[in-house]
Image (tube, rainbow, N blue to C red):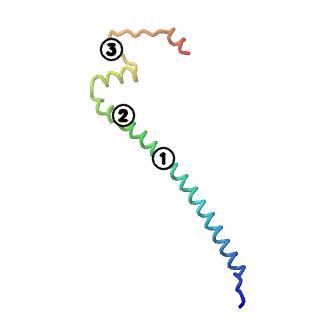
């Protein structure tokens, strides 16, 4: 009885296929990890933007109040009430520098 040997050609084909599969699998795993980190970063950015939206919505709701109008006029526009005197402490500015 003659024993049949496994042909060398089939062994090479199987080895090449296994190598290709391993490379493809490792590439897929690597890309998956990158995509997951991108998703995490995007979720953090979404949460941050939602907080900013909530803050802006509160400011919009309060924009009709006299306190908000006064705050904007004083802080952003530098306005003062009639006969109001503003004192500037020059020493305070030099200490902060």
Report the front residue among 56 and 26. 26
Q: Which residue is mark 1?
A: 40
Residue receiving disc 2: 55
Q: Quadrant of residue 54?
A: top left
Query: Which is nearer the N-term, disc 1 or disc 2?
Result: 1
Question: Which element is circle 3 on?
Answer: loop
- Residue closest to the far left: 65
Mark nearer the viewer, 2 or 3 = 2
The residue beneath circle 3 is 81
Residue at mark 1 to residue at mark 2: CA–CA distance: 23 Å
Mark 1 falls on what kind of element? helix
Image position of 83 with respect to 26: above or below: above
> How many angstroms separate mark 3 from mark 1 (CA)?
49 Å
Q: Residues within 10 Å of mark 1 (few under 14, many from 20)?
A: few
Q: Is residue 88 left or right of residue 2?
A: left
Of marks 1 and 2, the one in the foreground: 1
The quarter of the image holding the C terminus is top right
Q: Residue at x 32, y 21 (%)?
A: 70
């Amino acid at each position: 009885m003659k024993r049949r040997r496994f042909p060398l050609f089939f062994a090479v084909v199987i080895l090449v296929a296994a190598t290709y599969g391993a490379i493809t699998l490792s590439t897929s795993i690597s890309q998956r990890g990158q995509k997951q980190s991108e998703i995490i970063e995007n979720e953090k950015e979404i949460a941050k933007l939602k907080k900013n939206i909530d803050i802006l919505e509160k400011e919009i709701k309060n924009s009709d109040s006299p306190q908000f109008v006064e705050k904007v006029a004083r802080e952003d526009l530098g306005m003062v009430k009639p006969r109001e005197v503003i004192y500037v402490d020059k020493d305070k500015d030099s200490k902060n520098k």
